[in-house]
Image: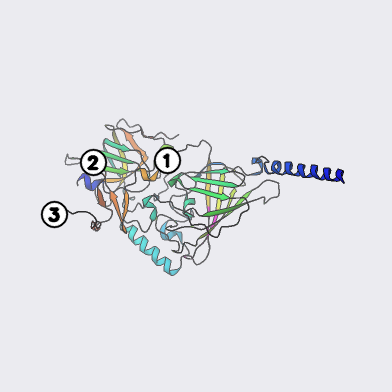
Amino acid sequence: MRFQGMIGSIALTMAVIAAPVAAQQPFDESKYPAMAGQWLRVGPLGVFDSTKPNGRGQQAPLTPEYQAIFEANLAEVAKGGSGDDPVYTCIPEGMPRAMNLVLPMEIAITRNTTYIMMEYLSMLRRIYTDGRAFPTDEDPSWMGYSIGKWIDEDGDGRYDVLEVETRNLKNPRTFDPSGLPVHKDGATVVKERFYLDKANPDILHDQITVEDHALTRPWTVLKTMRREKKPIWVESICAEGNIHVSIGNQHYLLNGDGELMPFMKDQPPPDLKHFSQPKK
Amino acid sequence: MTRLQSTSVLAGLAFAAATGAAMAHHSFAMFDMEHPIEISGTVKEFRFVSPHTILILQVKGADGVVKDWTLEGGAPGLLVRDGMSSKSLKPGDDIRLTINPLHSGAEGGSYQPAQIKFKDGTSVAAPK
């Protein structure tokens, strides 16, 4: 009995020693596709569907209500306005617009999280790959909460695809600078499949499907990026030299001397009721 | 037109890869993308800042009067990848360039690195 007890103790001790060793297995990079590094946009700037012209040419499947909102935004842009595009104040583009990739992005793969770092507006995506569920009480954010899953589609023991779902998004967001709107309820769901091109491993695809109440159906586009083998890393701090100012519901500009200027013709000045006005 | 008016119109991102569309930080609707013009002048200031670099150029008009033109270009990240840096242009440099002028007629527009040349004809941008 005493011998059995000793065996049991030894077994328990070995299990305790083994458990943390198993959890600390080194990250096996070879199991993952060569997605790490800098990627540049392929295709035109400023559109969600890279195969179609901007604006109405995107043929976004908007509901009648949101098509009317879009038309109003386009009309304002045609007059020189900003058409409900919120990014002029340097707030993040958010998802899915961030994947329009104005400037390069970098992918970094770690055991439990894949990071996508956008140079433009310094946006950061965290894609959790540790098997967690979506939280029920997390505050929304522009980049959303992303859960990913690595998939070995061809069964060769190596992952080929990163499937991602992003929820919990915050407004204001648009699909692109023309003011192509998402629903004001912010309940956008973005589903993605990242995979390297089979013929050319220096090409990365991101198939994006957006579900949003401003749309009549899910909207799927294919983004393509090319690898930059000699990357240059540039800091991009939008607030540094931004001359666009939001006061009330109006968009103004600062001129070269830092003076407030109208953004559009015949624009009313801001309300100065909180300032002491010089007596005339 | 006063400098105040000319500097009031600054806009979008000039994408050097000839995509045609240049909407990023905000719309390019204020520029005439269909009718570019060539201007020449002396650099007064080159602001190498995000979200858009700003080039202020002193340009002599047909009437002999020198006015400041405010030209907006891409973010530093784009210019660097097109072979420019904060040191590419300095006050006093004489340059000529093709710009997309403001629809309003004010002294301003958008520029792209590949379109800028020094007085001797050499390009300001040197793609890497």
Mark 3: few/some/many CA within 10 Å (<14, 14-19, 20+) = few
State whether discs 3 and 2 lie on one chain: no
State whether discs 1 and 3 lie on one chain: no
Give the quarter of the image for residue B83.
top left
- Camera sees residue B14: no
Subunit of label 3: A
Subunit of label 1: B
Q: Is residue A210 magenta?
A: yes
Q: Pointer 1 and pointer 3: residues touching (CB < 8 Å)?
A: no
* Residue for badge 1: B77
Badge 2 amino acid = Asp
Gap between marks 3 and 2, in whole Å? 34 Å
* Residue for badge 3: A279
State whether discs 1 and 2 lie on one chain: yes
Helix, strand or loop at label 1? It is helix
In what quadrant of the picture does the C terminus of chain A appear? bottom left
Subunit of label 2: B
The furthest residue to the top: B120
Gap between marks 1 and 3, in whole Å? 48 Å
Mark 1: few/some/many CA within 10 Å (<14, 14-19, 20+) = many
A53 sits to left or right of A266: right
Q: How many marks?
A: 3
Nearer the observer, A221 or A124: A124
Badge 1 amino acid = Gly
Mark 2: few/some/many CA within 10 Å (<14, 14-19, 20+) = many
* Residue for badge 2: B68
Residue A60 x, y percent position in the rendering: 46, 62
Which stretch appears magenta?
A: A207-222
Nearer the observer, A56 or B77: B77
